[in-house]
């Protein structure tokens, strides 16, 4: 489930990132001009010899996001590769002497020139100046960075990075007149105006964007720019060789004409075995449900197939190697993709058709019951942090719990956040379908004028926060999510059901959702279900301290062993059902 705490995102949504690693061996370094931004890339060897890929691409201006490189080919004259997860391709020609590669990056129908150079040193980026500062918005602080490069001809090139949001490389222009600085970032319709002191130790001013001005003081960062990104330790990620069969497969959702690509893992056994479909949470997910260098679905599939259970996991529509449009789809659309996966797997003779079921994580816990509720041949449904209440209740609960996990204890601030969220949700719920974005923002502001205290109404970031929140809530996906009632769907389930939640889940609160799931299943007459709150686990089922979203990346564990064992044991005990009548 995507966290939807309302906050002001001045630049873009944060990218999925990894932490730091010093690569060994040959490194290619390049800068790609994508118009309003420049992206710095490194191609480097993967040091783990058991990894599925030998090379990886590090995107320094997406917070050091690491992309596994697929179909990598390098010889004396050419360098070619593909990134399946982002559907990007590169093809370039290596120069004589092997020091440069000149070629094209192709993505979403567009070509960009990209030249790589061979580097052997760890430091590949040395700005002449680096200035950093922090801005306080209504609900969060944003760390900003300005990089300045002096050129041989005396000119300079300037970039803005939103460090907190892991989004950088935005082209900027700096103008200095005496002690007054202006830094314009045209692509963001933003600018900074400030005054540098005599000691050159700070520039105090304001960042203005979208009619909102925020205090920002920049100070020089004299540390060396070390942009080497270190891969976090993920000890659970399985390494080949595997004691089961691994097959790349494709199947089609005929109703929507969507071709889905995935991976099927099958135990090496003569008899048909129990089988499961993995259904991902919200947001465009690949087949491994990759997040912050964690691959939960890879680990779940590996564990189940090592214990006699076949597993099919697949890229969401419009993601990885799957076709279709993701952005305009709702949970109902995704349920047809999951049903196509079920039909494909249950028709495989190696899978026991009487013991084939569904495992959904987060939003997948909404989708799995949709499929199981309209079919009589689904043998079981496992809901991992699955919602039991509608999206409105989920978001209001999520907003408060995430802030509290981040250490926010001020009751007035928590109330202001909730009141703002209620106003935005009510605005979207009650507005006509053809209402414009500005009309929705103005309606929400009128509501807030009656519920927020004076100091909150005077916050300079309030209108921008409201605008960003309306944009997110007014999507087709979110409109469906806000009003969808899981209860009536759960009441239809006649197959065995296991619902698991982490005790410290701040995105899908177990105290709110597990009782609702129990109530719905009981009301429907289902007597073969179990609901379990697992101690000390978060939304990803990691053993954690607070459950905060910020912990996900720092925790080395991807899925707790107790969760893996519970899922596996429960399937073996409950999967086989009588033939459908």
Image (cartoon, rainbow, N blue to C red):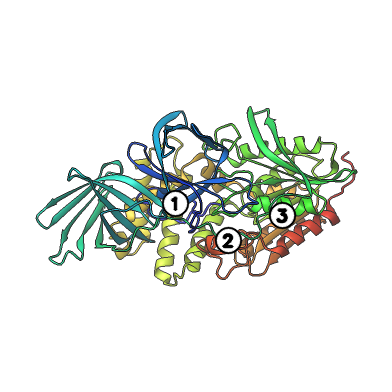
Q: Distance between the Cα atoms at labels 2 and 1? A: 21 Å
User: To which residue does mark 3 refer?
Assistant: 520
Q: Is residue 235 left or right of residue 420?
A: right
Q: Nearer the viewer, mark 3 or mark 1?
A: 1
Residue 341 is marked as: none
Q: Nearer the viewer, mark 2 or mark 1?
A: 2
Quick one: 463 or 560, which is closer to the camera?
A: 560
Q: Secondary structure at mark 1?
A: loop
Give the mark nearer the N terminus: 2 vs 1.
Answer: 1
Quick one: 158 or 524, which is closer to the camera?
A: 158
Q: Secondary structure at mark 3?
A: helix
The answer, for residue 524, to whether it is visible in the render is no
The answer, for residue 407, to whether it is visible in the render is yes
x then y, percent, for residue 180: 13, 55
User: To which residue does mark 2 refer?
Assistant: 233
Q: Residue at x 52, y 43 (%)?
A: 479
Give the mark nearer the N terminus: 2 vs 3.
Answer: 2
Q: Secondary structure at mark 2?
A: loop
Q: Residue at x 59, y 68 (%)?
A: 544
Q: Distance between the Cα atoms at labels 2 and 3? A: 40 Å
Residue 14 is marked as: 1
Q: Quadrant of the C terminus?
A: top right
Q: Residue at x 87, y 40 (%)?
A: 580
Q: Is residue 469 left or right of residue 326?
A: left
x then y, percent, for residue 74: 53, 36
x then y, percent, for residue 255: 66, 28
Q: Nearer the viewer, mark 2 or mark 3?
A: 2
């Amino acid at each position: 489930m995507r966290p939807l705490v309302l906050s002001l995102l001045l630049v873009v949504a944060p990218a999925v990132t990894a932490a730091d690693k010093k690569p060994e061996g040959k490194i290619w370094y390049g800068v790609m001009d994508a118009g309003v931004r420049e992206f710095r890339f490194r191609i480097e060897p993967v040091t783990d010899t058991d990894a599925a890929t030998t090379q990886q691409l590090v995107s320094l201006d997406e917070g050091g996001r690491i992309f596994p490189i697929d179909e990598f080919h390098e010889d004396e004259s050419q360098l070619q590769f593909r990134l399946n997860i982002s559907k990007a391709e590169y093809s370039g020609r290596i120069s004589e002497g092997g020091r440069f590669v000149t070629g094209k990056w192709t993505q979403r129908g567009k070509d960009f020139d990209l030249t790589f150079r061979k580097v052997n040193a760890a430091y590949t980026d040395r700005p002449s100046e680096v200035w950093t500062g922090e801005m306080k918005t209504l609900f969060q602080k944003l760390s900003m960075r300005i990089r300045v490069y002096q050129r041989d001809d005396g000119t300079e090139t300037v970039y803005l990075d939103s460090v907190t949001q892991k989004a950088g490389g935005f082209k900027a222009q700096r103008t200095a007149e005496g002690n007054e600085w202006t830094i314009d970032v045209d692509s963001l319709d933003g600018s900074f105006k400030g005054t540098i002191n005599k000691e050159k130790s700070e520039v105090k001013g304001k960042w203005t964007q979208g009619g909102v001005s925020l205090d920002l003081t920049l100070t020089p960062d004299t540390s060396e720019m070390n942009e080497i990104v270190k891969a976090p330790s993920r000890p659970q990620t399985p390494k080949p060789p595997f004691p089961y069969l691994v097959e790349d497969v494709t199947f089609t959702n005929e109703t929507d004409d969507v071709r889905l690509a995935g991976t099927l893992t099958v135990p090496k056994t003569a008899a048909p075995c129990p089988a499961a479909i993995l259904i991902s949470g919200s947001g465009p997910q690949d087949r491994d449900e990759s997040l912050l260098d964690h691959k939960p679905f890879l680990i779940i599939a590996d564990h189940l197939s090592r214990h006699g259970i076949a597993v099919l996991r697949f890229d969401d529509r419009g993601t990885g190697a799957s076709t279709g449009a993701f952005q305009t789809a709702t949970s109902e659309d995704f349920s047809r993709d999951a049903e196509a996966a079920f039909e494909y797997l249950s028709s495989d003779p190696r899978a026991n058709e009487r013991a084939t079921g569904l495992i959904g994580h987060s939003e997948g816990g909404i989708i799995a019951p949709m499929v199981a509720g309209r079919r009589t041949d689904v043998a079981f449904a496992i809901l991992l942090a699955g919602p039991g209440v509608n999206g409105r209740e989920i978001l209001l609960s999520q907003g408060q719990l995430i802030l509290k996990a981040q250490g926010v204890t001020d009751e007035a601030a928590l109330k202001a956040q909730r009141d703002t969220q209620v106003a935005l949700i009510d605005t979207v719920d009650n507005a006509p379908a053809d209402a414009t974005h500005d009309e929705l923002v103005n309606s929400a502001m009128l509501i807030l004028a009656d519920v927020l205290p004076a100091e909150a109404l005077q916050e300079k970031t309030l209108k921008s926060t409201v605008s960003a929140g309306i944009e997110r809530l007014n999507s087709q996906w979110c409109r469906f999510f806000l009003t969808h009632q899981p209860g009536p769907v759960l009441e239809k389930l006649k197959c065995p059901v296991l619902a698991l939640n982490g005790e410290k889940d701040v995105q899908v609160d177990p105290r709110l959702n597990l009782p609702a799931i129990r109530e719905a299943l009981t009301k429907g007459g289902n007597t073969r279900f179990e609901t379990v709150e697992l101690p000390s686990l978060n939304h990803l089922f990691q053993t954690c301290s607070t459950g905060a979203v910020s912990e996900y990346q720092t925790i080395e564990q991807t899925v707790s062993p107790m969760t893996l064992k519970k899922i596996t044991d429960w399937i073996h005990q409950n999967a086989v059902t009588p033939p459908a009548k």
